[in-house]
Amino acid sequence: MAGMKKNIWLLYWVLVVVTMGLFILFGHNFYHSNLQKYQDKQLLQLELFAASVDSLFKSQESLLEVVGHQLVEQNDFTRTAAMQVRPLLDNLMRIHPIIAGFGLANPNGDFIAVSSNVDLARAENLIANPATKIGFTEALNSNRMVLGHTYYFDAIDSLVIPIRKSIRNQRGEVEAVMTAGLKVESTLVFRNNIHANPYNIVSLIREDLYRTFVSADASLINRYDAPIDDHRYKEVIAAAASQLSLSEPELKASQKAVTVTTNGPQVSYLMTVKYLSDYKVWAVSATEMHFIRQQFYSQLGFYLLIFTILQLAFYGLVRSIANNEQQTIERLNKQATHDTLTGLPNRLYLRNNVNSWLKNKTSPFSLLFIDMDNFKSVNDTHGHDFGDQVLKQITQRLASFNNDQRLLVREASDEFILLVKESDPALLKSLATTMIAKMAEPYVINDVQFLLSCSVGIAVYPTHGNDLDALLRAADISMYRAKQERNSFNIFTTEMQEQHLYKTKVEQRLRFAIEQQKLFMVYQPQVDMAGKLHGVEALVRWQDEELGFVPPDLFIPVAESSGLMVKLGKFIIERSVSDIATYVLPQRQDLNLSINISVKQFIQQDFAEHLLTTIDTARLDRKRITLEITENLFIEDLEQFKPICNEMNHQGLKISLDDFGTGYSSLSMLKDLPIDELKIDKSFVDHIENDAKSFNMVKNIIAIGKNFGMAVLAEGVETELQANKLAECGCDLLQGYYYAKPLNVEQLQSYLDEQTEK
């Protein structure tokens, strides 16, 4: 889960980097798109301007051509004639208000006719005047109209562009030069408003690098007085020519508009240039790159704001997902590491966090393994919902022993673990004693009051183990030792460990012995009050190659706790029935056989079928078979075992209630079950000689059996006095070493022979 959260943030940062990369790419493309937009607009602007200029100049050139030829054809250039043509020229000025004045000069540069606004007498020779000499000379040598230097004319308060056109005869000889002045601000083409914005400049530049016209926000009158920077001019023209892979003459001849970017010392421009070859001027539109970038940044800022908002929204979404994921992880982690019923940490939590307890061996602690005694009966009797309520109360009581320095864990159904930072035996004993007393207080659930007890096993770190598994094993061993006494506690000892290891060894060897049928049966005779043989009780024995003789009171509990009892029970039934059928039946067909049956064996689905099949196959009389069952079996679940007992009785087998009086004897149980025999436990028989209470107890048991019509058998009879006392009480059958020890098959045959001879 933590990895998942990490992956979410990794994905987020990957997407952030990718989107930032895409935004940068977008910005790059948007910048070039924006630049291209300005290039396209500027190109269109310049093409329109160049076309307008060309059209204007051509119209003025035609006007000069016509007027000049008309004047030359008069062939009269006297002062009188000059005065006579003034009305014509003045009329043309009224028709063409953009004209500042007309003049006709001979090839020597002298004016021979002028409009009325020009004083002919004061007009300077055009060749003699340095300001007009170059332009006039160029006009003499050109077939096209020639532009002069733009200047400011005070008389009309306007910038004027001089224009000159040579007037030639049919032989191509120059007869005169027609001159005029264009008022810049009177033309639509040359008004100071054709630039697109305050950062755009539109201009006409002559080949001598003087400006013919400039359209800009700033006052540029003084810019007509000096040429532009030669280095800048060459740089721009070279860049334009290079872009088309042309030389400068080829670029001029092509008359193509070209856009380039120039980097000046202070200002950089986006420049579009086009050469008007007829009039030898460059049409130029220049926009400051700072303005273009500013417009780009302004628009990009809007997109950046949107991008930032989206990124913040995406971050918020991912953070929300991550937080929800973290909450889910924490919730799932708590579900995985905490018990849902009690809210306590569970075994997984303990295993994940126990290292904080184990890391310092100089700080010992103790592990208390707490198991509720006979809790299963609560669930079986009242149901699991009821049992859950009980567990909650148990948890509340155990929680009173928990604090910040301790850890309370629910290990399993009715098993709990408490880690405490104490190792002193006296303190542990005090804690366990207090805990056991607390757990033994009455429980009340749904107005039902009952008592429970617990068993506590204690292991100390690092004395009893260096890791959790070792401590749990030690505490478990000591807890099961405490469980033998119930409602008690035990601190682990090495002796317990040795006993546990021995028990484990017994279990391993017993499993092998059952599989290999290494066990054998002995039979202890049961006699009537006259000493006559009535039957035998089949008893299993085990002589192991490694362990030697293992007493049944040791290996039978091991078989029950390890799940081997069912197999062992089948072996006992099959071997005892086989022995009796093979070795005894030929001698005594009326001999009764008693077989001990365990609880786990009794509840097996195939128990009855297996038992009856085994008996019938050996051809034993079912009425001669007695099943010895302890009364504790019925206390487990009377309603479950009652039908099985009835079925056994119906099939002809007898039921003997073994060890009667040692458990929770109930007269109603004797009434409800088909019991044929009561068996008095040896613990009562041992003391009937000198203990009046034991004698009275035996006498009462025998009386109960008689009242219910049952036979009564006393086991553990070892003396003649005991036999006499039992006879005095009216006991029916006796069993014990006073009559015979448990016998193997050969010894039993000899015993039968002796009985026959009597």
Image (cartoon, grey):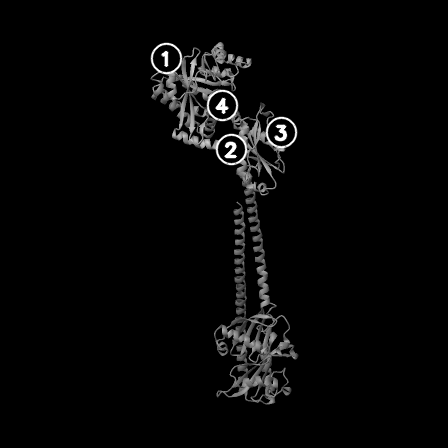
Given residues 166 and 284, the one toward you in this image is 284
Badges 2 and 3: C-beta atoms under 8 Å apart? Answer: no
Residue 434 is tagged as 3
Name which quarter of the figure residue 97 lies in.
bottom right
Q: Amino acid at mark 1?
A: Glu
The local secondary structure at tag 2 comes to helix
Residue 593 visible in the shown view? yes
Q: Amino acid at mark 3?
A: Thr
Mark 3, residues whose alpha carbon is within 10 Å: few (<14), some, or many (≥20)?
few
Badges 1 and 4: C-beta atoms under 8 Å apart? Answer: no
Residue 357: x and y, percent?
A: 59, 41
Mark 1, residues whose alpha carbon is within 10 Å: few (<14), some, or many (≥20)?
few
Q: Residue beneath label 4, please?
A: 636
Residue 757 is tagged as 1
Mark 2, residues whose alpha carbon is within 10 Å: few (<14), some, or many (≥20)?
few
Residue 605 visible in the shown view? no
The local secondary structure at tag 4 comes to helix
Name which quarter of the figure residue 87 lies in.
bottom right
Q: Residue beneath label 2, please?
A: 498
User: Mark 1 vs mark 3: which is more N-terminal?
Assistant: 3
Of badges 2 and 4, nearer the viewer stands: 2
Mark 4, residues whose alpha carbon is within 10 Å: few (<14), some, or many (≥20)?
some
In three-dimensional space, the C-alpha distance between marks 2 and 4, rounded to whole angstroms, equals: 32 Å
Of badges 1 and 3, nearer the viewer stands: 1
